[in-house]
Amino acid sequence: MNGQTLMLPIRVRTFTAKNVKVNVPYVSGGTTVAAREKMNEAIAAETHALMKEQGFPSEDIQEMDGTFEVKTNERGVLSLSLLNYVFTGGAHGNTLQRSLTFDADTGRSYQLSELFKPGSNYEERLNAIIEAQIKARKLPLLVKYPGISADQDFYLADKSLVIYFQLYDIVPYAWGFPYFPISVFEIEDIIDEEGPLGVLIY
């Protein structure tokens, strides 16, 4: 990852079936064919996993709507969120969100732990910041804050690492997805400078 000013062109393919419309982003240029293929395969796999988790295919699905949000697309870092809403009856539907963060030069996708220096004890540091935000924002927790997990959901945006939890995980449905933005400068000393967060600092 070289921190170049590269922005990737993002296009959309749309999957449709009965009561289903899912917009799938794909990278159409800006880097090598191999890197594009890696990123697009990961995006497609995550999209299909979300649809399956929401019950597709099923006659019970009255509506399924898949969308996405590009969070960062600069300096060779692509971070995006895939959202899948399904309604099968009842008071309201349910939305799941998953995010992917890539090195655009290679197509490599990153887990949260890979953003930090080995042995940095990033979990303890991030948990302390998140718990302080929960207290400051007076979030009505459904359960005791469980701490971040090995496969914790996150994305990168505006020089921040954004940790989030699924609907119902820690707060009531009405509060939506609880997002916890953490400035890269607050955790600069534990960031892997060669990874996506390191690129965004400078």
Image (tube, rainbow, N blue to C red):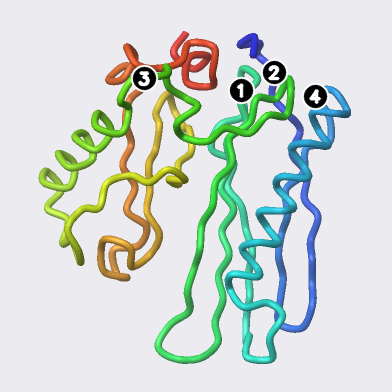
Kindly indicate whether the residue at mark 4 contacts the one at mark 2 (C-beta within 8 angstroms).
yes
Image location (x, y in percent) of residue 148 = 33, 44
Q: Quadrant of the N terminus?
A: top right
Q: In whole angstroms, how far apart are the C-alphas of marks 1 and 4?
A: 11 Å
Image location (x, y in percent) of residue 156 = 48, 33
The picture quadrant where one finds residue 9 is top right
**Amino acid type of the residue tagged 2 in the rendering:** Leu
Q: Is residue 112 left or right of residue 190?
A: right
> What residue appears at the point 65 percent right and 70 percent down from the top-left corner?
52
Local SS, label 1 = strand
Instruction: Answer above or below: position of 106 versus 173.
Output: above
Q: Earlier in the sequence, mark 2 or mark 1?
A: 2
Residue with the mark numbered 1? 74
Q: Count neighbours of disc 4 (C-alpha within 10 A) and say few if under 14, some if 14 to 19, many if 20 or more.
A: some
Image location (x, y in percent) of residue 142 = 20, 66
Instruction: Answer above or below: position of 68 versus 14.
Output: above
Residue with the mark numbered 4? 30
Q: In whole angstroms, how far apart are the C-alphas of marks 1 and 3?
A: 28 Å
Q: Count neighbours of disc 2 (C-alpha within 10 A) and say few if under 14, some if 14 to 19, many if 20 or more.
A: some
* Nearer the camera: disc 1 or disc 3: 3
The picture quadrant where one finds residue 83 is bottom right
Kindly indicate whether the residue at mark 4 contacts the one at mark 1 (C-beta within 8 angstroms).
no
> What residue appears at the point 63 percent right and 85 percent down from the top-left corner?
61
Residue with the mark numbered 3? 119
The picture quadrant where one finds residue 59 is bottom right
Image location (x, y in percent) of residue 54 = 58, 73
**Amino acid type of the residue tagged 3 in the rendering:** Gly
Instruction: Answer above or below: position of 154 versus 24.
Output: above
Residue with the mark numbered 2? 6
Q: Earlier in the sequence, mark 1 or mark 3?
A: 1
